[in-house]
Image: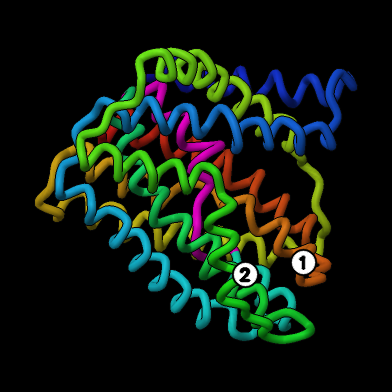
Amino acid sequence: MNQEIVTIMLLIGVGYLFKKLNILKESDGEVISRIIFNITLPALVIISLNSVQIEPSLMLLPFIVVSYGLISVLFAYFVFKNEDKELKGTLMMLSPGYNVGLFAFPLVEAFWGAEGLLYFGMFDAGNSILIFGVSYILGSYYSKDGLSLNPIGIVKKFSKSIPFMSYIIMTILNLVNIKLPTEFIDLATIISKANMPLSLILLGLYMNFTFEKQYVRPIFKYLLYRYGLGLLFGLAFYFLLPVSHMFRITILIGFLLPIGLAVIPYSHEFNYSTTRLIGTIANICIFISIIILFILANFVL
């Protein structure tokens, strides 16, 4: 597993180096991310869910993820209650939700293959509810214009998410035992192989080590909150939950993943001035999550 972590770090480093050498620009990341979310990641979901058997216990994963997400929001409310409204709204938006598609899937694919992708796919189904529902509502509530919740708009966001709809469709097909044509699966397999390198290079492309000094305290506070709470609940589930080992690994690692990057568009939509802060926290979380994963891989898992 250590070799896989080294490979992952090198690929992230390639993305960062390409940016520094002006081979790629950070603005190119939008195109790459569109390719990942709309092409390579759905292809990976398709091949992962086409042939494996979904156990009934897996249906518990999205429920646990959503429940923990709501608990984390409750904790965040008290932790950040004394911050100004915009900063509090930003940190509240970041409290639920994880970077599964770009960060977790490449690592899981390298470590656990199709079985791991199945479990983390179910984890991401619950995560999508947090990202597209809870985070969106929180961002709207703490914005300057106040809550402008549009249930139809949120439903449309779900339906327009190709990875999320891929989970739903492939899960249904799997449960009713319908297999896709071999030719289609072969094509999806070829496309899916690009997901891991593209995702990791993209993370390197977004890597940024500069941040504004006034955000040092809230960043430190947020990191303590996110990883302290995630580690507490993750380890509790890992050692106490009477389910399969892969199920417990998914919960433990999932609760320690970096923040979901979908909140960046929300910050633009609700006219927050903290987009750069979100990017800084995302970068720091990537490093922390990699370090934690290395420790867990060698001493716990």
> On the rendered structure, is 29 left or right of 196?
right
Q: Which residue is mark 2?
A: 153
Q: Determine the image quadrant of residue 32.
A: top right
* Residue 238 to residue 83: above or below: above
Look at the image and give the residue range highlighted in magenta.
94-112
Q: Position of residue 145 (x, y in %)?
A: 77, 85
Name the quarter where the C terminus is drawn: top left
**Would you say the magenta stretch is mainly helix, strand or loop?**
helix
The amino acid pointed to by label 1 is: Glu
Secondary structure of residue under mark 1:
helix
Give me the residue at 84% from left, 23% from top.
24
What numbered label is drawn on residue 269? 1
Task: Count neighbours of disc 2 (C-alpha within 10 A) and say few if under 14, some if 14 to 19, many if 20 or more.
Answer: few
> On the rendered structure, is 198 left or right of 15?
left
- 3D distance between C-alphas at marks 2 and 1: 13 Å
| Residue extending farthest left | 242
Secondary structure of residue under mark 2:
helix
Indicate whether residue 97 is drawn in magenta. Answer: yes
